[in-house]
Image: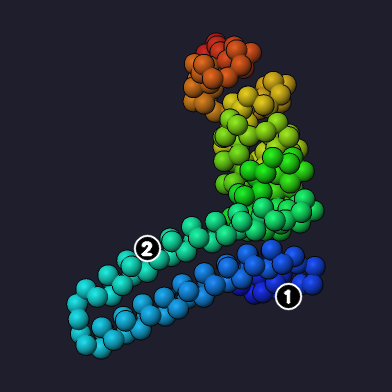
Amino acid sequence: LSNDELKAARSNPQTTEVLQAHIDQQLSIAAHFEALAAQERNGQVEANEEGESGTESLAEEDFADHEEEYDELRTASKQQIAMELSVSEKVKMAMTGDKEWRSIMLKDSNKQISSAVLANPRISEGEVLQLAQNRSTSEELIRLILLNREWLKNYPIRLALTQHPRTPISQAMRFLSTLSEKDLRILSKSRNISSVIVNNCRRMLAAKTKH
């Protein structure tokens, strides 16, 4: 969430005191690093006026380090906030939040919450691909990915789903005809997928050789 969104949530009369405290913490962190960034910029200006060499690049490196620290603190703060949210609030955040919120909500043990992330219009195909490639992704999330025709147009996603242990064999078999010969050869030698898929890959390759 942006600072403006956090402030709006802070002023919401339905926001609990605990959640308000966490929002205050995140705003404080943001203010600290904004002030730090301003100091870095001022330091660069003064150094340039004095003609000192190398100062600008050092300041940029320092600020990059500060930005990384800020990202870590911001994510940690969001995780703290998430612990205080109700199920309905988490579902809403899963469906509307940014990438950090989506990552947090995907790890929630409640299927209703983690599944809501896939209904977020801001989720990217890259995030969906990561889920499809992760062998620990739940059966429910794989089912929802399989129901989205737009995602299935993405070749890497189809390939990942073909190999996922929670993809129904019947679905995986349908994807085989859309895969390249190179990938079929790789799958035909894989020990990490169903023998049914492996054998079908071998049959398809044999048929191609005959022709």
- Does residue 29 appear left or right of residue 106 in this picture? left
Residue 153: x percent and y percent? 66, 40
Circle 1 SS class: helix
Which quarter of the rendered picture does the N terminus lie within?
A: bottom right
Residue 150: x percent and y percent? 70, 44
The amino acid beneath tag 1 is Ser
Crowd around label 1: few <14 · some 14–19 · many ≥20 (10 Å): few
Residue under label 1, please give it: 11
The amino acid beneath tag 2 is Asp
Q: Is residue 73 visible?
A: yes
Residue 57: x percent and y percent? 28, 70
- Does residue 160 appear left or right of residue 34 in this picture? right
Q: Is residue 121 visible?
A: no
Structural distance between the alpha carbons of marks 2 and 1 = 32 Å
Residue under label 2, please give it: 65
Q: Earlier in the sequence, mark 2 or mark 1?
A: 1
Which residue occupies 60% across, 31% down?
136
Residue 15: x percent and y percent? 75, 67
| Residue 50: assigned label | none
